[in-house]
Amino acid sequence: KAGVTQTPRYLIKTRGQQVTLSCSPISGHRSVSWYQQTPGQGLQFLFEYFSETQRNKGNFPGRFSGRQFSNSRSEMNVSTLELGDSALYLCASSLDGTGGERRYFGAGTRLSVL
Amino acid sequence: QQQVKQSPQSLIVQKGGISIINCAYENTAFDYFPWYQQFPGKGPALLIAIRPDVSEKKEGRFTISFNKSAKQFSLHIMDSQPGDSATYFCAASRAGSYQLTFGKGTKLSVIP
């Protein structure tokens, strides 16, 4: 069974640009959540989607957005990039995303903002 | 507000020794406490998890100890091996939530 696939693995952007990251969950998983990982803050929850609906959102500005498609694949978008957005963005999939359920993480997309 | 506090930030253990990582939480509604292991260039992977109805869970060389009254839980790695060198994250979630709240991580180095 294929794991969680995130593309691209690496991205370099400049301030003010926007970026779109993609996540393909494990087949059969309907919940996709996104996390930002930085050395200073660790892993911070961005948002979670289930059946194309955002069910929960973390404490991030509106520049961070996402969506989920009918095949459960998800994208996240960051507009007007800032230097502080440089991070590893991780996607996790699970069957239904409830509290005690196992999440499977992808290898992440490393975003560098110059 | 950091809801899950993890310590130490880094840990060096000799091969064969015991690695101990501690976490404390604030939200008494949390009812699921997983530990994740992350190697460089990889995403976190679930190592072991516990619910508050038990005080200890063991899987191979990895043990979680849970103290509900103190709102603390810890990961013990027995007979630590160089292959255990990784970053470890504790986390917590609650019923009805769709997110994990993570500690800031512990970088473990096991030296031969």
Image (cartoon, coloured by chain):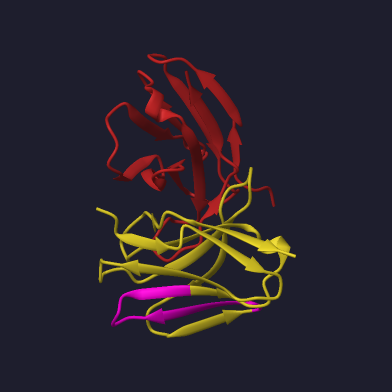
Chain colours: A red, B yellow
Q: Within the image, what quadrant is residue B31 found in? A: bottom left
User: In percent of the image, x 27 and y 42: which residue is there?
Assistant: A59
Within the magenta stretch, is there residue B68? yes
Residues in magenta? B60-74
User: In percent of the image, x 37 and y 79: which residue is there?
Assistant: B52
Please determine whether, in this image, residue B75 is positioned above or below residue A79.
below
Q: At which x and y percent is residue B29?
A: 26, 69
Kindly report the secondary structure that dominates the magenta region of the rendered protein. strand
Q: In the image, is A2 to the left or to the right of A105?
A: right
Within the magenta stretch, is there residue B99? no
Front residue of this view, candidates B20 and B62? B20
Q: At which x and y percent is residue B74?
A: 46, 74
Q: At which x and y percent is residue A5?
A: 61, 40
Front residue of this view, candidates A98 and A106? A106
Please determine whether, in this image, residue A1 is positioned above or below residue A35.
below
Note whether residue B92 is visible.
no
User: In percent of the image, x 35 and y 61: which residue is there?
Assistant: B5
Q: Within the image, what quadrant is residue A66 found in? A: top left
Note whether residue A92 is visible.
yes
